[in-house]
Image (cartoon, rainbow, N blue to C red):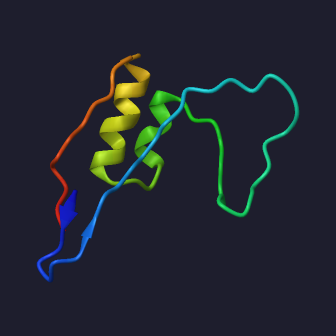
Amino acid sequence: MLEYSDGNKWQLGVFHFDAELVSGELEPSEETTQFGFFSLSEKNVLGMNEVDRKRVLDGFAGLQNAVINNDFSI
């Protein structure tokens, strides 16, 4: 649970998936504006914050357990 200085609270849930396209085409939805497949070497050109960058590196490392970091800055 994260709390702003004004007392508002929120809890963030972020899920990253390792996926393989088995058929069909990637298409955007009402929740997605961009999508794609990226290699580890391409990660530095993606616009993401450091927390998401950690999660991507964890995925490429093949970590099976949830990694919970409480190092958000608001």
Q: Residue furthest left?
A: 5
**Residue at the image position 72 percent from the left and 64 percent from the top:** 30
Residue 72 location, x and y as percent?
19, 56
Seen from the viewer's position, the closer of residues 60 and 39 is 60
Residue 7 location, x and y as percent?
15, 78
Residue 43 location, x and y as percent?
44, 39
Residue 44 location, x and y as percent?
40, 43
Seen from the viewer's position, the closer of residues 61 and 4 is 4
Q: Looking at the rendering, which quadrant does residue 53 occupy?
A: top left
Q: Residue furthest bottom?
A: 6
Q: Which quadrant of the rendered structure holds the N terminus?
A: bottom left
Q: Which quadrant of the rendered structure holds the C terminus?
A: bottom left
Q: Looking at the rendering, which quadrant does residue 59 occupy?
A: top left
Seen from the viewer's position, the closer of residues 66 and 59 is 66
**Residue at the image position 17 percent from the left and 62 percent from the top:** 73
Q: Is residue 50 left or right of residue 20?
A: left
